[in-house]
Image: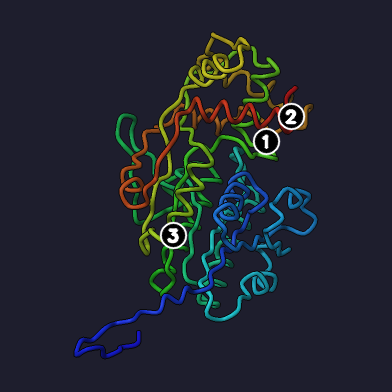
């Protein structure tokens, strides 16, 4: 600020020197990461994406994105990723992670989700970034009895959640929050079941849409989950870079959608008839060995597993009040999400 005297008055002239800024995004070739970097580029932001060497999906990223090849498990590559000129505001969005519906311990899931996150936090502290946003999951939050609304918590314990994915996300989330005590400005977001367009790898929800189109599902399953549009989650994450409180967590969910409603919405949009019979859980569990063999032959992620069936009958009543109030978080109708997903899959020639 410079002060100028004028006619006996003091006039304050404030120079609006806008600080250079950059967004560093991990997992940028994934469903959520791709959507985030695409939105940032659309907003005119400078973006650097961390992509695994040899990842063919990096070719799908917007041309404006600066690609840095590296690995969250390689601290040296992270030093290159975090190497930014001085006087630059650095916003880090850590999306990289492995989602699994397996209940078996998988060393790589632990390494990427926990050790990779620890490496990212340590690098962020070392390079004095402006903001660190960690993409956790609602699965990291202990489940409450059905009928009770699940809200944000401030402590995470892997022993209070079920399954290797949930446990790794809980452990990583606590490490991120502990970094706030070391001076890092961290915010954690907890998306629910992400769906919508832009899934080049055909994640679980997108694969379900493809199978609905192909008519390969003989019946549905009783239960459902909270499905949220990837674009709404992306907007919430970007908003948290500036509005998210230090050491605060925000649930980015939508609402409970049963598998029956999922099918009905798809049928209304496409005109393709879907199963009306919803198998009880005991029938679905009995069919798991056959489902596993079916998806193994097709070389696809299994839509149904012990963990996914557990999820479909779990409490999926999440509160988004905090995110809506503090981040300006908003969600669109599920019908719009389904319609846009079908259109995107058609454009990608994934369904014909």
Is 164 in front, or is 343?
Answer: 343
Q: Would residue 28 be found to the left or right of residue 299 on screen? A: left
In this rendering, is residue 257 above or below 246? above
Is 56 in front, or is 147?
Answer: 56
Q: Would residue 32 be found to the left or right of residue 333 on screen? A: right
- Is there CB contact under 8 Å for labels 1 and 2? yes
Q: Which x, y percent locates residue 303?
A: 63, 28
The numbered mark, 1 or 2, whose residue comes first in the sequence reads: 1
Residue 164 disc label: none
Q: Which x, y percent locates residue 55?
A: 76, 52
> Total marks drawn?
3
Q: Nearer the viewer, mark 2 or mark 3?
A: 2
Identify the element where label 2 is drawn.
Answer: loop
Label 2 to label 3: alpha-carbon separation? 38 Å
Q: Quadrant of the C terminus?
A: top right
- Per the image, the residue denoted by label 3 is 174
- Per the image, the residue denoted by label 1 is 202
Q: Quadrant of the N terminus?
A: bottom left
Please tell me in which quadrant of the rendered image residue 126 appears. Answer: bottom right
Callout 1: 10 Å neighbours few (<14), some, many (20+)? Answer: many
- Per the image, the residue denoted by label 2 is 350
Identify the element where label 3 is drawn.
Answer: helix
């Amino acid at each position: 600020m410079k002060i100028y005297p004028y006619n006996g008055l003091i006039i304050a002239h404030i120079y609006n020197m806008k600080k250079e800024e950059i967004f560093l995004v991990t997992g940028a070739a994934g469903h959520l990461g791709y959507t985030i970097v695409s939105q940032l580029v659309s907003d005119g932001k400078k973006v650097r994406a961390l992509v695994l060497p040899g990842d063919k999906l990096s070719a799908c990223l917007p041309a404006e994105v600066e690609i840095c090849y590296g690995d969250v498990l390689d601290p040296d590559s992270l030093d290159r990723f975090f190497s930014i000129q001085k006087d630059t505001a650095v916003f880090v969005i850590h999306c990289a992670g492995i989602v699994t519906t397996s209940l078996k311990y998988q060393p790589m899931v632990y390494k990427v989700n926990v050790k990779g996150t620890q490496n990212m936090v340590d690098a962020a502290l070392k390079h004095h970034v402006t903001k660190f946003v960690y993409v956790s999951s609602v699965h990291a939050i202990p489940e409450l009895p059905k009928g009770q609304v699940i809200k944000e918590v401030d402590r995470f314990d892997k022993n209070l959640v079920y399954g290797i994915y949930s446990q790794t996300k809980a452990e990583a989330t606590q490490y991120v929050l502990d970094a706030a005590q070391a001076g890092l400005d961290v915010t954690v977001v907890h998306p629910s079941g992400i769906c919508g367009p832009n899934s080049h790898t055909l994640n679980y929800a997108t694969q379900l849409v493809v199978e609905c189109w192909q008519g390969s599902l003989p019946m549905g399953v009783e239960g459902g989950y909270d499905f949220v549009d990837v674009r709404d989650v992306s907007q919430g994450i970007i908003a948290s870079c500036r509005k998210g409180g230090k050491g605060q967590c925000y649930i980015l969910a939508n609402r409970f959608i049963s598998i029956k409603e999922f099918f009905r919405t798809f049928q209304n949009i496409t005109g393709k008839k879907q199963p009306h019979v919803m198998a009880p859980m005991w029938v679905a569990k009995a069919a798991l060995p056959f489902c596993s063999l079916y998806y193994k032959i097709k070389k696809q992620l299994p839509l149904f597993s012990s963990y996914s069936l557990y999820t479909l009958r779990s409490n999926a009543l999440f509160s988004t009040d905090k995110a809506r109030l503090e981040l300006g978080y908003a969600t669109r109708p599920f019908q719009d999400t389904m319609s846009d997903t079908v259109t995107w899959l058609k454009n990608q020639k994934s369904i014909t």
